[in-house]
Amino acid sequence: PFSHLLYCVQNAREVNAGLLSPEKVGVRAVDEFTLQMDLCAPTGYFLRLLSCPALSAVPRQAIVAPAPRQTNWTDPGRIVTSGPFLLSEFRLRDRMVLTRNPHYIEAGLVTLEAVSYLLIPNETSCVNLYKSGYAHLTAGIALSPHLAPALQRKRDLRTSPSFGVWFPCFNTRRPPFDNVLLRYAVNMAIDKKAMADVFGFRRTAARTLVPPLDGYSPPESLVIKVDGEPYDVLKHDPQGARALLAKAGYPGGRDANGRRVQFDLLGPGSADVRLRCEILQQQLRSTLNIQANIATQEFQAFLERIFSGNYRGMTEYLDWGLYLDPNWFLSQFVTGASVNATGWSDANYDEMLAKANSALDQRSRMQMLSECERYLLSAMPFIPVFYDVWAYPQKPYVRGMLPNVMDVHSLKYAWIDTSWRPS
């Protein structure tokens, strides 16, 4: 069902151009107030899925423009929205300005007249603008660990767990990581708590892929027997990691010809990514005596390379769910998924996940999803390292903008407390 809905989104242009009929897409407006969506099968997470912004309903007539098309349907003055604010200004790499929507159904609850988003990609510039008073909060940026000592004790720092996880991926279709025992060894060698502590802001070490979620119980251990010896491959166990490294055919980190194991560790070019890769590189060198050679690329080129499988070794990977359900992460590894950077696939896993997602009883579904994750972890196409957090400074007089796991803030309830004074 999720891939079916993505098919709907991806083919929106064809529908608007008349190349596909709405009936083939499975979404139709029954009347002015009702949207009908036809699914391929029962979908236990469907309502959560609808919270994903990409699936918001938009009016077809506002998108279709006479040819030749002069403006984009998302431009100010053209975009049609039904929320508490309207897009009144957009300047690329500068700012986006929203103004109060007088036609909103609950316009009386909206107190802000306008909101200006400063489109600043550099986190240091964002923090400096905040310190100068030019910005009221800096939500939406990832604060680097070098800022942690200066910000962690500030009273205006807002933190919240996020539905995000850092999980570097292996290319399981190329040596050396086509060997699952080597993948186990790497996972067991990493001191994940130490890495989480380096990046601060209350990040926590990860044993499994899906971040903590109410009602979901991930596998707490995964014991694999190799040559009759049990190994918990989810545990930080340097000694066990070295034993599995030898059983994988690389005793002391060297192959049969005595050459040290080397591979690429690929990532986009940013300071945060570089630091994560360097720590990973150092831990693998000191614990397993294997060498990760760090290589960085421009972000778009990086994505194209990893999703095509055109790399040898490991790739940096950090992801946040757009809807609050284990399926966001687990569905990335079904056969044919466009966002699978590992190359791993398994028909049995596909069937298990499809069966779990068709269960309408949520308790049963969560238990089945936990078994799916256990099966996925037994293949170890990635290493879950730490669960991410949202951390940003916010002026104390900004009200109605509370931290939350999805980092979603409704401007409808935001207001400025003009009576606030420093205590």
Image (cartoon, rainbow, N blue to C red):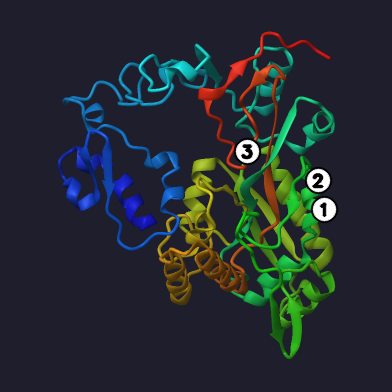
Residue 161, percent from left and from top: 68, 44
Q: Position of residue 51 (x, y in %)?
A: 45, 43
Taking 150 as reference, is 262 above or below it? Answer: below
Amino acid type, callout 2:
Val
Rendered-image quadrant of the C terminus: top right
Figure quadrant of residue 158? top right
Question: Is residue 134 visible in this depiction of the protein?
Answer: yes
Can residue 98 be seen here? The reply is no
Q: Secondary structure at mark 1?
A: helix
Residue at image x 59%, y 66%? Answer: 381
Relative to residue 17, is residue 292 drawn left or right?
Answer: right
Q: Which residue is mark 2?
A: 198
Seen as rendered, the residue at the extreme bottom is 228
Displayed quadrant of residue 376: bottom right
Label 1 – label 2 distance at C-alpha: 6 Å
Q: Are marks 1 and 2 in contact (CB under 8 Å)?
A: yes
Callout 2 secondary element: helix
Q: Which mark is residue 404?
A: 3
Q: In the rendered structure, which amino acid carries the disc numbered 1?
A: Ala
Q: Is residue 389 left or right of residue 376?
A: right
CB of mark 3 within 8 Å of CB of mark 1? no
What is the three-letter code of the residue carrying label 3? Asn
Mark earlier in primary sequence (3, 2):
2
Q: Is residue 199 above or below residue 66?
A: below
State how many labels appear. 3
Badge 3 vs badge 2, beta-carbon distance below 8 Å: no
Q: CA distance from mark 3 to mark 1?
A: 25 Å
Of tags 3 and 2, which is closer to the observer? 3
- 10 Å neighbourhood of mark 3: few (<14), some, or many (≥20)? some
Q: Is the residue marked by circle 1 packed among few (<14), some (14-19), or many (20+) residues within 10 Å? A: some
Q: Read off the residue under disc 1.
A: 194
